[in-house]
Structures are given as structure tokens and as C-alpha cells.
Image: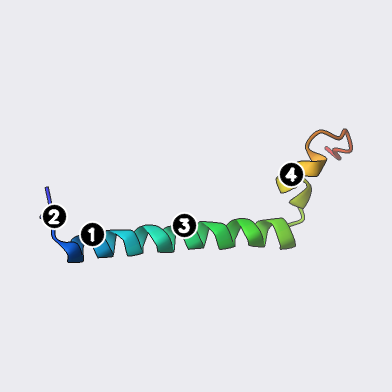
Amino acid sequence: MPQMNPIWWLSLMLMFLTILLLTNTMIFFLKTYSPFSKIFNKKNISTNNWKW
């Protein structure tokens, strides 16, 4: 178990925030530029316009 010092907590929070930011940018990139954007779009999930 690591020591509970403020530097360790700060690094942990920074790591968590960077991972969150990376996932958000990846999801945004997929929604915007992916050819499968209909899958990620919530409006088109309920429709029956799938092209399988």
C-alpha cells in the first residue's frame, strides 16, 4: 500500500483526469469521424435504418 501523502494523491488524480480526457476525446472522435457513427449516435439506435 502506498503512502498517503499529498503528492501521491495529486499524481493519482492527474492520471485519472488524463485518462478521462483521453476517453472523452476518443469517443468524440468516433462520433464525429467514424463511418459507424450511427451506432454511437443515440438518436439512431431506436430506428430501424440499419444497413447490415
User: Which amino acid, mark 2?
Assistant: Met
Residue at the farthest front position: 6
User: Which amino acid, mark 4?
Assistant: Ile
| Residue highlighted by disc 4 | 39
Q: Which mark is residue 50?
A: none
Q: For the residues carrying marks 4 and 1, which lies nearer the camera in this image?
A: 1
Viewer-closest of 9 and 29: 9
As drawn, is 37 to the left or to the right of 16? Answer: right
Q: For the residues carrying marks 3 and 2, which lies nearer the camera in this image?
A: 2
User: Which amino acid, mark 1?
Assistant: Trp
In this view, 10 is above or below 43: below
Describe the element under mark 1 as helix, strand or loop: helix
**Upstream in the sequence, badge 1 or badge 2?**
2
Residue occupying image coordinates x 64% and y 60%: 28
Q: For the residues carrying marks 4 and 2, which lies nearer the camera in this image?
A: 2
Rounded to the nearest whole Å, what is the CA distance between mark 3 and mark 4?
A: 21 Å
| Residue highlighted by disc 3 | 20
Describe the element under mark 4 as helix, strand or loop: helix
| Residue highlighted by disc 1 | 9
Residue occupying image coordinates x 65% and y 62%: 29
Residue occupying image coordinates x 74% and y 44%: 39
Rounded to the nearest whole Å, what is the CA distance between mark 1 and mark 2?
A: 7 Å
Coordinates of residue 50 in the picture (x, y in percent): 85, 38
User: Which amino acid, mark 3?
Assistant: Leu
Q: Which mark is residue 4?
A: 2
